Amino acid sequence: RFQRRNRPCRYDIDCFTPSFLSIFESLVPSEEEIAKQKQLLTSLSRLINEEWPNSKLYLYGSCANSFGFSNSDIDLCLSIDDTEISKVDIILKLADILQAGNLQNIQPLTRARVPIVKLMDPETGLSCDICVNNLLAVVNTKLLRDYAQIDRRLRQLAFIVKHWAKSRRVNETYQGTLSSYAYVIMCIHLLQQRRILPCLQEMEATYYATVDDSNCAYFDQVDKLNNYGAHNRDTVSRLLWAFFHYWAYEHDYTRDVISIRTGRIMSKEQKDWTRRVGNDRHLICIEDPFEISHDLGRVVDKFSIKILREEFERAANILQFDSNPITALFEPY
Ligand code: GTP
Ligand code: MG
């Protein structure tokens, strides 16, 4: 294991970059699709504002954080500060409003961990989920989008990692593997370690939001940082190799917590994540950048950690040795 830790990347890794970039390009949504999403946001906002003039509808998740694939569902969050009415009642009333507005396949899911309404818009053909007052998700969406603007390699890397995770079926939180959100945070962490990305939450804040009890502040004038990682010339293939090599052989699963909030690796001791509490098993520790008591690896259990680590090793070995790594890497599980 020690030898593998220090293994250098194969000398010809960069010759796969054009293929990885064309996979990336094939996953990016078209301008037309993005325009349709905006159109849906506008028409739904208009409809909902007639009933709740003080509410506001936000896009969040992959369609707004710039890590979304084409043809993915849209995540929307309705912000409303009416304290008279419960979240569940808001969801039910929202379903009625949408029904009256001729939207289709409307399903209020009031018992879910995060209550939502699902719907399909016949005009654009898009499906979406609307949740209520989940503003932390709106703020972390902005943080991810801001990071993506600093260096284009983040988006390239994260798309390929997400594509790998979906192909290998390790992007299924209900099966104990990681969310897309967690994978993007892992990519940001790697690029921070390589000084390709800064740590925005450690810089002087230019953006502030207080959501629930979390103080969300960071430097968001990212257009001033677009040369930040230029000293590092690593290609996306090399970064992909480094990503899998890190999670296969370098990460200390017994001790480490990755933290993009601090730009460092923290210890489980420091976070008091050494004991199992409720569902938090802390077998792979990924700190949420704003909800800092929240481990994005909480969904991982003693079975799925094995699957996940085997997949990291498989990917690392393919990128190290395989003569046709692209086919092998995304081979459907
Ligand atoms: P795909 O749908 O797989 O393309 O990706 P996605 O970016 O929509 O990811 P996901 O469905 O994992 O999450 C949607 C959004 O919910 C994320 O962008 C976050 O804003 C938020 N989110 C997801 N998981 C968590 C979590 O564990 N904690 C918090 N605070 N927010 C989360
Ligand atoms: Mg999503």
Image: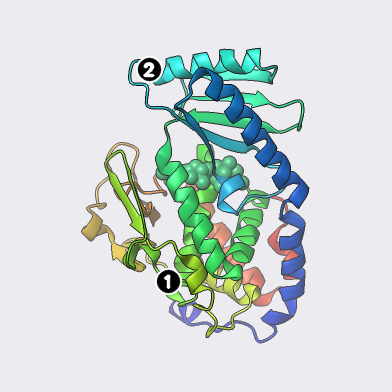
| Residue 202 position in % (x across, y down) | 32, 66
Q: Residue at x 33, y 55 (%)?
A: 217
Q: Residue at x 36, y 68 (%)?
A: 263
Q: Can residue 171 be seen in the rendering of this structure? A: no
Label 2 packing within 10 angstroms: few (<14), some (14-19), many (20+): few
Label 1 packing within 10 angstroms: few (<14), some (14-19), many (20+): many
In this view of the protein, which residue sits in the foreground, 206 or 238?
A: 206
Q: Residue at x 25, y 52 (%)?
A: 274
| Residue 93 position in % (x across, y down) | 51, 14
In this view of the protein, which residue sits in the foreground, 50 or 188?
A: 50
Q: Quadrant of ligand 2?
A: top right
| SS of the residue under disc 2 | loop
Q: Can residue 196 be seen in the rendering of this structure? A: yes
| SS of the residue under disc 1 | loop
Proximity of marks 1 and 2: CB atoms separated by less than 8 Å: no
In the drawing, does residue 149 fall left or right of residue 328? left
In this view of the protein, which residue sits in the foreground, 10 or 310?
A: 10
Q: Residue at x 37, y 21 (%)?
A: 82
The residue that disc 1 covers is 198
Above or below, 232 against 83 in this view is below
Tell me the quarter of the picture where residue 287 sits.
bottom left
In the drawing, does residue 299 fall left or right of residue 226? left
Name the amino acid type tagged 1.
Pro
The residue that disc 2 covers is 86
| Residue 170 position in % (x across, y down) | 58, 49
> Which numbered marker is on residue 321?
none
| Residue 7 position in % (x across, y down) | 52, 82
Upstream in sequence: badge 1 or badge 2: 2
Q: Disc 1 to disc 2, how far (Cα)?
A: 40 Å
In this view of the protein, which residue sits in the foreground, 203 or 171?
A: 203
Name the amino acid type tagged 2.
Ser
